Image: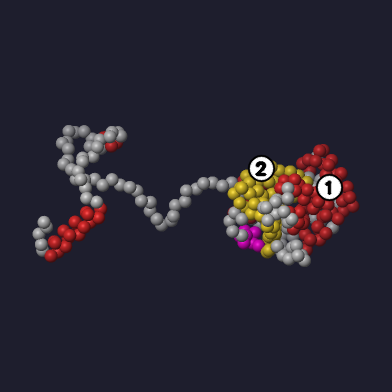
Amino acid sequence: MRRDILELRAFYASELGRRARTLIGRKLTQAWGEAGGQDLLGLGYATPYLGAFRSRARRVIAAMPAQQGVEIWPAPEGNLSTLADEEALPFRNALFDRILVIHAVEESPDPPALLREVWRVLAPAGRVIVAVAARDGLWANHEGTPLGHGRPYSRRQLAALLREAELEPAGYTRALYLPPVDWMAGAAETFETLGARLWPRFSGVLLMEAVKQSYAIQARPQGLRRRTARPILAPAPAPARTGANLFGAQALGAREPWPARPLEGPAERHSLILEASMREACGEASP
């Protein structure tokens, strides 16, 4: 069951949520820069992180799962968010250059189907970052935050899930070493520095970047039969039977020429056959 949009909004409005947004957003900026001229999609609850890309990106859209609910973003400037079925996103194929998936995979009823939709709407040269609660971190065991619900992932589990959706992992990083306690939010930078050096496995969030796997498939229209060129053979006197295999020359690849004899073209043959049939129907003798 997904967290309600009101719970997510309340978390990011708290001091602990603001610190989490700063630490995770820094990792996204390091990976993508300002995404200048790119089309960017945020899937799940990504609006706290999309604002950093709006000034330079060509297009920024937030899609929120129907079970979670949707909010107007970026109010009061307008609305760039939409309610979406996570297994049937309302976008055409290969539309987005960058996709951020956060607060989406852990509580999805079908994570492979969700990521297959991500694969569909991702451009061939595009990149996706999937952020999930880390299995070994403190945040996955604290139900007072959105990261304490749903299924957390280890690095290998997340990589296997991405490959199942034909997304090839290209790199990963970790964030949020701060314990999920409000009164410790002021020491977030200290925990982030020490945690990355001393206990890197015990982060709160795992972020993995992946690229789209595309395969060249020769498409064949259904219901149509492929035409194959066939040689037109002219009648010729049968060779004398010497006991040899009559198909031996073709079977062994010998280059025996066909008997030379002039042939009419397809149109001429059709005309002659039609004329002979008409004469026979009228009782006339063929010339």
Q: Which residues are magenta?
A: 84-90
The secondary structure that dominates the magenta segment is loop
- Whichever of callouts 2 and 1 sits on the residue coming sooner in the sequence is 2
- x%, y% of residue 112? 62, 52
Q: Is residue 85 magenta?
A: yes
Please name the residue shown 14% across and 64% down the image.
Answer: 281
Q: Is residue 282 above or below residue 101?
A: below
**Amino acid type at mark 1:** Leu
Q: Residue at x 20, y 59 (%)?
A: 274
Give neighbour class at mark 2: few <14, some 14-19, many 20+ (Cα, 10 Å): few
Q: What amino acid type should be assigned to the residue bearing mark 2?
A: Ala
Give residue 191's position: percent from left, percent from top: 85, 44
Neighbor class of circle 1 (other Cα within 10 Å; few <14, some 14-19, many 20+) is many
Label 2 vs label 1, nearer the camera: 2
Residue in the foreground of this view, choosing between 120 and 144: 120
Mark 1 — residue? 178
Disc 2/disc 1 C-alpha distance (Å) = 26 Å
Quadrant, the C terminus = bottom left
Q: Give the labeled residue for mark 2.
A: 170
Looking at the picture, tell me which residue is in the foreground, 168 or 59.
59
In depth, the one of 283 and 12 nearer the eye is 283
Which residue: 73% across, 56% down?
54
Give percent across and percent down for residue 214: 56, 47
Query: Quadrant of the image for the N terminus?
Result: bottom right
Relative image position of residue 183 (x, y in whole percent)? 90, 52
Q: Is residue 192 left or right of residue 168?
A: right
Query: In which quadrant of the rendered view does residue 199 lie?
Result: top right
Q: In the figure, 196 relative to 51: above or below? A: above
* SS label for mark 2: strand
